[in-house]
Amino acid sequence: MMASNPQKHAVLLMAACATLWSIAGSFIKMVPWNPFVIAGFRSGIAAVVVVLFLRATGRHIKVNPYSIVSGLFIARTFFAFVTAN
């Protein structure tokens, strides 16, 4: 899937990201579950994907106060997105 130049590749990845984000909103509206359950399942799937990526690339998570605060804000934004939909 590598495009001929990095800029085209970046544009394709951003278009894919926007498409998947929009589809997520549609699927959230179709599921009659509580927002906590939907957010929990989505977060669980994301955690599995991140762990698999970290293992495949040999990287490690660096935990510090900034990463904890960032994680809390991202979690709040994610839950607000699911609740709003």
Image (cartoon, rainbow, N blue to C red):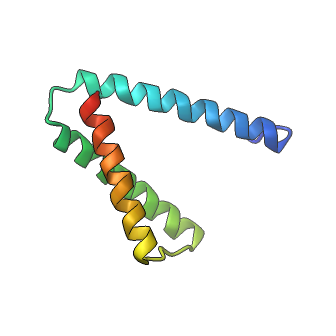
Residue drawn at point x = 30 percent, y = 50 percent = 76
Residue 77 in sight: yes
Q: Which residue is rendered at x = 38% and y = 53% of the image?
A: 74
55 horizontally vs 8: left or right: left
Which quarter shows the N terminus? top right
* Residue at the image point whose x is 26% and y is 44% from the top: 39
Res. 1 visible in picture: no
Corner quadrant of residue 38: top left
Q: Is residue 5 above or below residue 16?
A: below
From the top left corner, tell me how far across and down residue 80 is, in percent: 29, 40
Displayed quadrant of residue 26: top left
Vertical arrangement, residue 12 with respect to residue 61, above or below = above
Q: Which residue lies most toward the right here?
A: 4
Q: How many marks?
A: 0
> Image height check: is 2 above or below 69?
above
Give the residue drawn at x 51%, y 75%: 60
Q: Locate the C terminus by quadrant.
A: top left
Residue 17 x, y percent position in the rendering: 55, 35
Q: Viewed as shown, does residue 57 lie left or right of 3?
A: left
Q: Nearer the viewer, residue 44 or 82?
A: 82
Image location (x, y in percent) of residue 14: 63, 36
